[in-house]
Image (cartoon, helix red, strand yellow):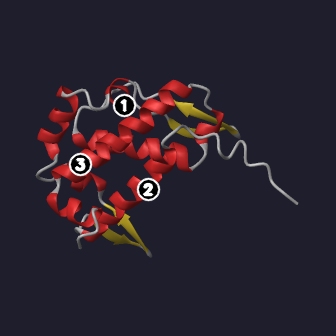
Amino acid sequence: MTVDLTEANALPPLSNKLFRVFARFEFSLKMTGFAHMRRDCVEIDWDRFANSAPIGRQFFAHIRDHNICPTILAEPPKSDYIEQGRYGFADHVNSSSCAQELFGAVRRVRNNLFHGGKYFDDDHRRNRLLVKETIAVLLLAAEWSPDVNFCFEGRA
């Protein structure tokens, strides 16, 4: 028996790169102390990272002022939901106004891809932009944070 993988392979270009970058970035956050135990699992403390030096306000201002992720900032990724047994997406009417909200949007892009929500979305141009911009934000954050960069690049 074979399974047709056509639909499973229908994610936006660069999705595989995003998964690799995101996984390495989360690993680096764990290794640099931006994680804690919650029940029986490790939980990444994205908010603490987003508000830490050298990220925080200056990182967000740089992202905004250099137009690094205009789609994420102007039209944030949607949250998926299930209502009365039907799957869908809810718009985020507010754009990101700080690093913490930006990293929340970055995680939402990854979650929408990883958990399958983007298989039902026909806005291919927007999806490509969200993936590309998410990669750019994560790599710039790794560049700005020396400890995270050290682990991300495998020097630890």
Marks 2 and 1 sit apart, C-alpha to C-alpha, by 20 Å
Residue placed most toward the observer, 107 or 47: 107
Name the residue: 44% across, 48% down: 18
Residue 71 falls in image quadrant: top left
Q: Residue furthest right?
A: 1
Indicate the quadrant containing the C terminus: top left, top right, bottom left or bottom right: bottom left
Indicate the quadrant containing the N terminus: top left, top right, bottom left or bottom right: bottom right
Marks 1 and 3 sit apart, C-alpha to C-alpha, by 15 Å
Q: Which mark is residue 72?
A: 1
Residue 95 falls in image quadrant: top left
Position in image of residue 152 (x %, y %): 29, 62
Local secondary structure at mark 1: helix
Reading the image, the residue beneath label 3 is 141
Q: Is residue 10 above or below residue 64?
A: below
N-term-proximal mark, 3 vs 2:
2
Q: Residue furthest bottom?
A: 40
**Mark 3 is on which residue type?**
Ala
N-term-proximal mark, 2 vs 1:
2
Marks 3 and 2 sit apart, C-alpha to C-alpha, by 15 Å
Residue 22 falls in image quadrant: bottom left
Count of numbered circles on the image: 3
Q: Is residue 145 above or below residue 8?
A: below
Q: Are marks 3 and 2 in contact (CB under 8 Å)?
A: no
Position in image of residue 62 (x %, y %): 16, 34
N-term-proximal mark, 1 vs 3:
1
Residue placed most toward the observer, 104 or 8: 8
**Mark 2 is on which residue type?**
Arg
Reading the image, the residue beneath label 2 is 20
Local secondary structure at mark 3: helix
Name the residue: 25% across, 64% down: 34
Local secondary structure at mark 2: helix
